[in-house]
Amino acid sequence: MHKEAAIREPLILGHKSYHDVTEDVCRSIEDKAPRMWYILFGIALIIGIYGVGCIAYLLGTGIGVWGLNKTIGWAWDITNFVWWVGIGHAGTLISAVLLLFRQKWRMAINRSAEAMTIFAVFMAGTFPLIHMGRLWVGYWTMPIPNQFGSLWVNFNSPLLWDVFAISTYLSVSLVFWYIGLIPDFATIRDRAKRPIPKRMYSMLAFGWSGRAKNWNRFELVSLVLAGVATPLVFSVHSIVSFDFATSVIPGWHTTIFPPYFVAGAVFSGFAMVQTLMLVMRKAMRLEAYIHVRHVEYMNIVIMVTGSIVGVAYLTELFVSWYSGVEYEQYAFINRATGPYWWAYWSMMTCNVISPQLMWIRPLRRSLVFTFIISIVVNIGMWFERYVIIVTSLHRDYLPSSWTMHFPSHIDLGVYVGTIGIFFVFFLLFARFFPVLALNEVKTILKSSGESYKNAPSHGHDDHGHSDHGHVEDNTNSNNQ
Amino acid sequence: MAEKVIYAMYDDDDVLKDGAKLLVAKGVKVSDVFSPFPIHGIDPIIGVKQTRLGIVAFLFAITGTLLATYGMRFFMITDWPMNIGGKPNGTYLDNMLAFVPITFEFTVMCAAHGMAITYLLRNKTLPGMPAQNPDPRTTDDKFVIELKHSENSQFSEDELLSMLKQTGIIEIDQKEIN
């Protein structure tokens, strides 16, 4: 067991025993759902169904129902795609990168952040698929032998790299998440009393028994998966940025894109985690596990990545001037002062100024302030992608083609619809899955739990915990 | 063949670890430990070897790298070479940089999935498998040591029980398992 300095704030507040951790997490699964859950689920479902309807209309009619035109052939579809993929970067970063760095605070949030990641990547994947117009030929992106002669997909194209990157990221995140879930499903299975949940969770738990050898393998698999998922996280958004960076469009043709996109992705992902966690900890009474200290750590990540994004914006401006290329220069002057100035300055305010407020300690420890900033950041990050994509396209080399982009109601419906579907998934997750990594939280209870940390005798055999007082008395009475 | 086993239950991981040390020092073979979370440091005490899944992951990773390399060489160089603006891309090496992202992604995909599937198979954890933990509380807050009579034939049943009782157990149980 690693000892921790007493001066560090405990990660688990209150006097929790192992059993309390189980109770606190399983309570929301075993009890009836509160009325608020049904209300939120209903709202999300209605919005989601509206989105599905819009997608069905789009597929039936063609992508002409979007507000695209000859000059702007990519707008909300790819904006939403990049936005969702970016949001989907926090979960694996938290569980993989922070695992490698042995950051114990990740354990309170990794499970739900990973769930959030998987649902966000689902939503992201929707956009390239429906933007094909003919969804049913989506499998043509795979290199499979076909009836058209020896015709393969183009492995030189970043769009194909994206196919591989996103599908690898989604499937590896799913595996990582599920392997961590198996022991926790076993806990719920062994507590379940009613037959149907018992059978359901037995199935989900895969017969997990918690043998020493199982745990030995579990720990190594988690470590190796974290090791391979870490470069994966960075590669995925780098490759997303190649979609733009390898083109020759002024405003896109920029070598700074990969690190800048990755920082932006982490930035928006953590903001989304904050938005969800702040509501979840309250609604599910998990304040002892996800508290101000965790929020503060995440805010520091938001501040650092937000600053990287800010530096990248300024570097882009500088390089466009320094390059001496007049088209490149115009692209950036047009962004800031052209007809899309409002989008550019929204982006600047939300992404560059708002995270800097996190330098102030009372602000980054304020839950209300964090909640507001987390939403502001994600609005800003949506505008960032919109600015990069639309403002670079709307005034091209031919002034007679210059135009503006006006989203149609289908654009709006599909976008809002994916938010609805995302929340449908997330609410189902919060209702039926363990939202805290039970087995991982239990491993840090003794090193980072408040009652153990600040116990007067920090000894090896007895941790001054009330539940352990009766060990000796029961020894004889329970023997057979 | 039915076998008699003793299950000794503890309610603290450190107590179990000390108990296991004591038993092993006396020559008792601890056949398994069931716990709700990994007990760090228990493996060397009860003689659980470090898993070789890391090697499996590496082998799958190499397989992925080779498959991706071979595949892209076949698709883009041998089978259907593309003329992209007359740029030199006639050989694999000329075109290699463009293949790096997919080679990397495919390596990761094979390593992660290959290892995960091997892990599930080796653990015998698959959908529909029955749970084997002796007590439902071992996935909550209790820790169990499993002793097999057949592996500890030099001790009598009473000797084993009395040794276990000195290690701070809270419950003890005997079962016949197949």
Image (tube, coloured by chain):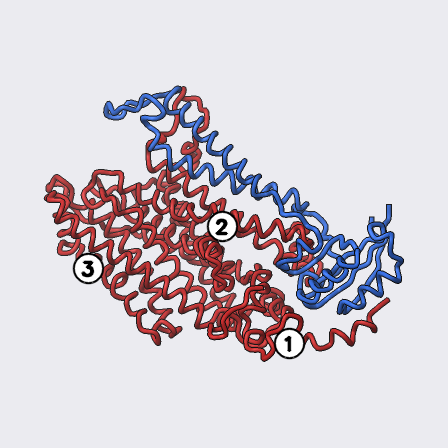
In front of the other: label 1 or label 3? 1
Q: Residue furthest front?
A: B25
Q: Colour of chain B?
A: blue
Give the residue number, with chain letter if any, for mark 3.
A342
Which three-letter amino acid code belongs to the residue tagged 1?
His
| Disc 1 and disc 3 on one polypeptide chain | yes
In the rendered structure, the answer to whether residue B134 lies left or right of residue A173 reads: right
Q: CA distance from mark 1 to mark 2?
A: 34 Å
Q: Are marks 3 and 2 on the same chain?
A: yes
> How many numbered marks, from 0 up?
3
Q: Please tell me the numbered disc located at residue A226.
A: 2
Res A61 quadrant in image: top left
Tag on residue A465? 1
Quarter-wise, where is residue B156 in the image? Answer: bottom right
Q: Which residue does the image show at 48% across and 29% down from the upper left?
A: B67
Label 1 SS: loop
Q: On screen, A196 above or below A19?
A: above
Mark 1 Cα shell of 10 Å, populated few (<14), some (14-19), many (≥20): few
